Image (spheres, rainbow, N blue to C red):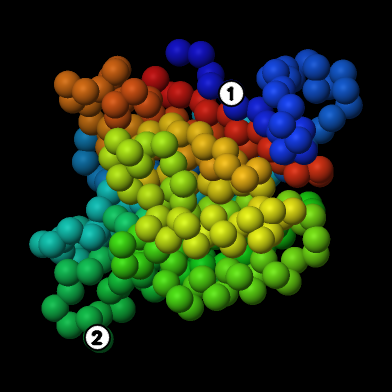
Amino acid sequence: MNRRKFLTNAGLVSAGIGLPAVSSAEEKKMGKKPVLTVAHITDVHIRPEEDVPSRAIDWLKIVKKHQPDFYLNGGDSIHDASYEGVTKDRVIAQWEVWDQFRDEIKESEVYSCIGNHDPWWDVADKDQEPMYGKPYVVERLGMPSLYYSFDKNGWHFIILDGNHEGISLGEVQMNWLESDLSQLAANTPTLIMSHFPITSITNALVGGQHKDHKELKKLFYQHKDKVRVCLSGHQHLLDRTWYNDVHYFCNGSLSGFWWGDGDKESAGKQYYLETPPGYAILKLYEDGQVENEYFPLR
């Protein structure tokens, strides 16, 4: 399968001018270089069975060849801790193989968000069990907090936690996000990552997007000089939306059909519907332009 490439120019698109894709050779001729190259992996769903750890690591080695400046991990790092009946030993076993996977890129920075399958909820004594809920996921993924922001090479990055009622941020986090964006200097290009898509096409097929998408849309419009990209996973489907000068990139999952071969609706082996397993490489430019290229692994 050919690589799927989506190259956008935020400035010209906002002016209503359609652009052809720009090849790497043309970029070099123009002397245009990204200030950051970022790998986006999401929905790894790692588990001990079916040789999944070695399969996942083999694919991670392919991602490494791009030599990204850092990685964005979109959540659902482990296969599942969220269902009823999941035991403590099962949760530990999944995080142990995640550690093996993470060790393959131990020299690199990885910024993660929490997926809906990562936290362990079915605990008898929630007050006494240190592995209960989202704080343990924060610890295992090396996150500074449930949601956070950071800066790299002139870009601002915001990592959200959509694991609140009905897929939302909740009041406290929404207030924090408003404050974080308000404190930025004008025209600071910003990338926002949530496990769940904020706005998507595939929501019409499988659901799964933020229920607070209207509030977020309004907030992003207030800061339209800053918010350039919203990045997500969760759907296991490749999805592109552009609205109010914001690019919503929902990338496919590293695990594809959860490491299985697929079902009658799969377009190919390990596909979920028409999307193969894969990862994305983002190139971020000083002027706020962004390129998101999806690399199928099947």
Quadrant of res 281 = top right
Marker disc for residue 126: none
**Disc 1 marks which amino acid?**
Lys
Q: CA distance from mark 1 to mark 2?
A: 48 Å
N-terminal-most mark, 1 or 2: 1
Name the one closer to the observer, 280 or 204: 204
State the residue at coordinates (60%, 27%). 6
State the residue at coordinates (22%, 35%). 50
Vertical order, 141 against 238 (above or below): below
Q: Residue 128: horizontal and vertical position, in percent?
A: 24, 86
Q: Which residue is mark 2?
A: 128
Marker disc for residue 5: 1
> Label 1 crowding class (10 Å Cα cut-off): few <14, some 14-19, many 20+?
some
State the residue at coordinates (80%, 17%). 26
> Label 2 crowding class (10 Å Cα cut-off): few <14, some 14-19, many 20+?
few
Helix, strand or loop under label 2: loop
Vertical order, 68 against 126 (above or below): above
Name the one closer to the observer, 158 or 40: 158
State the residue at coordinates (66%, 61%). 222
Which quadrant is home to the C terminus?
Answer: top left
Which quadrant is home to the N terminus?
Answer: top left
Helix, strand or loop under label 1: strand
Left or right placement of residue 224 versus residue 239 in this view:
right
Kindly indicate whether the residue at mark 2 contacts the one at mark 1 (C-beta within 8 angstroms): no
Q: Residue 167: horizontal and vertical position, in percent?
A: 35, 60
Vertical order, 216 against 61 (above or below): below
**Disc 2 marks which amino acid?**
Gln
Quadrant of res 66 = top right
